[in-house]
């Protein structure tokens, strides 16, 4: 029978972001209204963005041990380009060091670019260091479905009382 549990690998990033950097990102996020829904970015998206910046900062500091990164303006266009090139070349997650899909890697870059783009439009950051860096997404095949036809049929035809007691065996 198909199981759909996915073990999350442990992150290699030990310490969080410097307070100033995290506050800058949070202030950009909280000033941003998502056009389509007129809502704020969801908590999950916010966490993912903070995580992406943790990975980016970790990478830059490992590359240039003397570099101090405590705010968005401490990152350079060269940092952005090197990060992108390394992700694409190694195909490894900057969080776990494990091989991940191209789209997962693009997701990190999209998060970073999004904050810089919003930061520039809010006049909180001078330069969008990701502006000239093309970020592609690859089309992916549809996901495997975890329920059998019989299980779907059972769910589809169940009434509310049955649903409470139901198992999918």
Image (cartoon, rainbow, N blue to C red):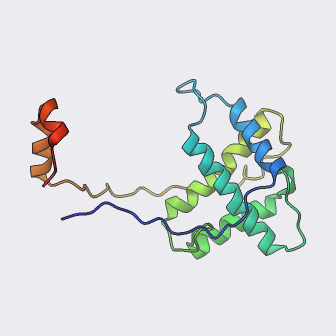
Q: Position of residue 55 (x, y in %)?
A: 68, 62
Q: Position of residue 37 (x, y in %)?
A: 53, 26
Identified at 15% across, 46% down, the residue is: 152
Residue 165 figure quarter: top left
Residue 70 figure quarter: bottom right
Identified at 59% across, 36% down, the residue is: 41
Quadrant for the N terminus, please: bottom left
Residue that lies at the very extreme toward the top in this rendered image: 38
Q: Position of residue 143 (x, y in %)?
A: 31, 56
Let me know if residue 134 appears in the view: no
Looking at the picture, does residue 132 appear above or below residue 60? above
Let me know if residue 77 appears in the view: yes
Looking at the picture, does residue 84 appear above or below residue 34? below
Q: Nearer the viewer, residue 77 or 7?
A: 7
Identified at 77% across, 34% down, the residue is: 121
Judge from the rendering whether residue 126 lies leftward or rightward of residue 97; answer left or right.
right
Q: Nearer the viewer, residue 141 or 68?
A: 68
Identified at 83% across, 34% down, the residue is: 123
Judge from the rendering whether residue 121 lies leftward or rightward of residue 89; answer left or right.
right
Judge from the rendering whether residue 112 lies leftward or rightward of residue 64; answer left or right.
left
Q: Nearer the viewer, residue 95 or 139?
A: 95
Circle count: 0
Q: Position of residue 44 (x, y in %)?
A: 55, 44
Quadrant for the C terminus, please: bottom left
């Amino acid at each position: 029978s198909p199981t759909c549990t996915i073990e999350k690998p442990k992150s290699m990033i030990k310490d969080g972001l410097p307070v100033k950097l995290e506050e800058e990102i949070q202030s950009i996020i909280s000033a941003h209204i998502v056009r389509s829904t007129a809502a704020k970015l969801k908590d999950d998206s916010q966490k993912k963005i903070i995580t992406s910046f943790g990975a980016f900062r970790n990478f830059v500091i490992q590359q240039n041990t003397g570099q101090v990164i405590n705010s968005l303006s401490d990152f350079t266009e060269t940092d952005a380009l090197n990060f992108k090139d390394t992700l694409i070349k190694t195909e490894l997650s900057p969080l776990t060091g494990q091989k991940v899909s191209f789209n997962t890697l693009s997701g990190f870059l999209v998060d970073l670019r999004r904050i810089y783009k919003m930061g520039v439009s809010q006049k909180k950051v001078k330069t969008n260091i990701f502006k000239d860096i093309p970020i592609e997404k690859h089309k992916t095949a549809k996901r495997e479905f975890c329920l059998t036809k019989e299980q779907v049929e059972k769910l589809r035809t169940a009434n509310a009382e049955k649903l409470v007691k139901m198992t999918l065996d």
